[in-house]
Amino acid sequence: MARADDPSKGGPRRSGGWSGDRRHPIAKAMRNRTVREEFPAAGRATPRVWLVLSDKLGDNAQVRVLAEALGWPFEVRRLSMKPEYVLGKPRFAASLHHLDRERSDPLEPPWPDLILTIGRRCAMAALWIREQARGRPKIVLVGRPKRGLEAFDLIVAPPQFRMPEAANVVPLALPLMRADPAKVEAAAAVWRERLAAMPRPLTAVLVGGATKPFRFDREVAFALIAGLEAMSARDGGSLYVTTSRRTPAEVVAALEARLPAGSAFHAWRPEGGENPYFGLLACADRFVVTGDSVSMMVEVARLGRPLAIYDLPLAGDPLVRLRHRLGRALSGGGAAGRIGEILQKRGLVGIARDLRGFHHRLYAAGLAVPFGEPFRPPREIVEEEVERIAERVRRLVA
């Protein structure tokens, strides 16, 4: 069903000014309104819900999963960033200073009762919206906060983040990511015949890129290739390797030059082109995923496919290693962990991401194996978490 102001669903996009500009007529009118006028409850059977989203498709998909589970109509507000903040990280504040306002959807009354959002940049806008709306909207953040936990009404915390315990934090066993079933089904019809001639088992190798505190360079690419050769010698079959937007150019070149004979290879390119990703999700027998990409690991696991995780080595930078160790210490047990929890709750230190800890959660749950071990059929995932989180959100708004 198309929803208002959701261009991806065919809904209309509104145009106009921003209430953040104090000179704008809407901003002037808002300063003279009462809270009662801003939130007309009469005639509304459900709360007004906004999804505040960015250009990150994986992040957006997680918010949509929760929004669909709620069963309420929702409106999408898409935000575009200034060039320096497309990859860069803005100073965290309740602000719109990081947004390209001309290319973003307008943020103006009538204000929502509930905001679902994800990520630093969108969370900043969500907090700004609440300030303009005099504290009315409840904010549900998927992911880790970039300031004190108390800034958000509910935090849906994926397991790759070491979150402290708090009344407004709901931990997840698995992130809300999942491959679009319609896209997987459509890709199966296209790719099944194309892949039919490749010897089985067909192993899809999904390659990500470097992310702190890990490195992914030419040397690591060669180690991955050596491991794939050993796996192929042991199990037979064939390889289909595909890279992503974050894969370094030197890694792409190394993979393309050194893969075993008979392997298929696809390099992601910014100009687009046909991408085999969904075709592989539909048709491959098993998967190797580099350990930097939570989204690819979870999408494979949720499809019930055999998964091996290729762990990346720590970066050589001493400062990066020190930060990694400090983050683990402050997020662990004992006295250091208790100190870290206090500092996190007060927003004095960030929430650490622990990718290796997440890998071990998948191993313990029977959803993956370390690369090099024999593949095994994964355990079935019982889909109960989304409804549990949705019920928490309903109670929050009520």
Image (cartoon, rainbow, N blue to C red):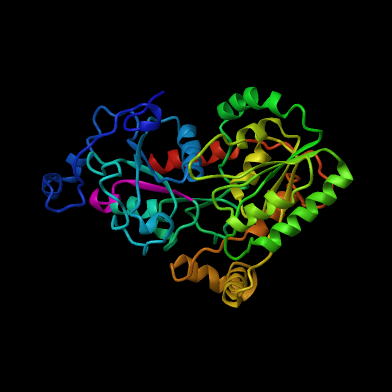
User: As drawn, which residue projects farthest toward the right?
Assistant: 234
Query: From the image, which quarter does the C terminus lie in?
Result: top left
The residue drawn where x is 35% and y is 31% is: 46
Quadrant housing the N terminus: top left
Tell me where residue 378 appears, x and y as whole percent.
Answer: 76, 40
Q: How many marks?
A: 0
Q: Is residue 136 magenta?
A: yes
Q: Which residue is located at x 77 percent, y 52 percent?
A: 371
Closer-to-camera residue (150/200): 200
Can residue 373 be seen from the camera position used here? no
The reply, left or right, for residue 27 in relation to residue 211 is left
Q: Position of residue 244 (x, y in %)?
A: 58, 47
Q: Residue at coordinates 57% horizontally, 64% vertically from top-left?
A: 212
The vertical placement of 274 against 336, above or below, is above
Q: What range is drawn magenta here?
A: 129-142
**In this rendering, position of residue 317 left or right of residue 63:** right
- Give 329 or 387, whichever is nearer the viewer: 329
Magenta-drawn stretch contains 328: no
Seen in the image, is 314 located left or right of residue 49?
right
| Residue 172 horizontal/vertical position (percent) | 58, 48
Residue depicted at 61% across the width and 50% down the height? 294
